[in-house]
Amino acid sequence: MEHEENRDKLVRLSKHGYELLKHRNLEQARACFTEMLTLDQKNAFALAGLGDIARKQSDYKQARSFYVSCLEYHPDNNYARFGLADCYRGLKNYGRAIEYWLTCLENDTENLSIIANIAEAYRKSGEFSRAELFYKRALTVNGRYAPALKGIGFLYYDAAKYPEAAAYWEQLLTLATPHPVEVTILAMTGDCYRKQAEFEQALSFFELALHTSPTHFMSLYGSADCSRGLHRYREAIEYFDRILRAEPENQSILTRAGDVCVNLGEYTEAEDYYNRALAVGEHIYARFGFVRIERRKGNDRGVLTLLEEIIKIYPGNRRVQRELAECRERLRT
């Protein structure tokens, strides 16, 4: 009779604990699972539940100890194996994570979450071929599985296979709710086209991203760079200025905006951007910006003076040495 009462209580505590866990009431859930262990110290649901709580708090080492205990008593518990694999992922020990996920997969061969997790772990380990194999395995099971479409896109992007990355991300972007369109994916799809110098196509994705997030850095920068590539210099400056409103001391953007002004022949405006960059701190490209202005004006003496100043600041810089030598040679002839 007492055994049955304990069993019924364990069932009630387990259901309540996991319901609390679902709603992130972690301390109350912990109390339920701890009480379960006073009734049955080997209870799989209690040990895995305590592991889940620790994992949600990013305490992967403590979570691992609970899952390991669960597996000592219940070697075939796939849930604990999955949790243990996720702990190793959190600890960036991708080899061990893969080991446990592969074991999980033996008992659940078409589990998309497990397959995609293995692929992601291989990707983060730099094992391109194996990651590709598992992403494609997931997409064979379900060609619309969002995590696999997203992950394989990152895999190809990191490998500089931009047409392939864009193709998978565009499939992801066509998915209807409940898969929301991610600004990052829109921007990175645009970036794939930018890197292939397909600027108009790239701009269409950056514009969609900016419609959702008007201050998104990657989309603003990509739009500026595409506009520059299309010789739409005014538009490029507008995009750079939008970045500078949020990051007024971004030297890289200040010098790029200055360079666009030089392309327009607006030297006073260019000098203003370069001076703003130098006001933040020393920056070689801002100094080269002034050299570009004098070169555009055909003023080799001015170029020489500026390069002689730069070589004092950057005495070992090969580009400065080369340009200085070329300038002196031109002035001798």
Image: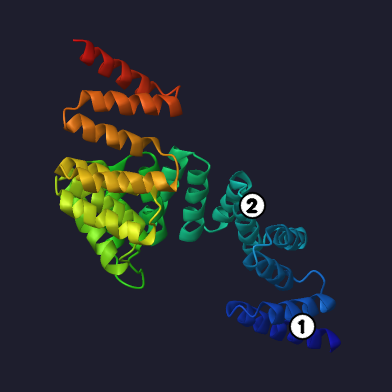
Q: Which amino acid type is marked by label 1?
A: Arg
Q: Quote the CA–CA distance across marks 2 and 1.
A: 36 Å
Identify the element where label 1 is drawn: helix
Give the percent coordinates (x, y) of residue 42: 79, 69
Q: Residue at x 58, y 78 (%)?
A: 22
Q: Which mark is residue 7?
A: 1
- Would residue 143 be seen by someone viewing this image from the given angle? no
Pick the residue in front: 182 or 211: 211
Decide: is 75 above or below 270. Answer: below
Q: Residue at x 29, y 70 (%)?
A: 176
Q: Quadrant of the C terminus?
A: top left
Q: Quadrant of the N terminus?
A: bottom right
Give the percent coordinates (x, y) of residue 133: 42, 44
Q: Which residue is mark 2?
A: 91
Give the percent coordinates (x, y) of residue 45: 70, 72
Give the percent coordinates (x, y) of residue 157: 36, 44
14 relative position to 223: left or right: right
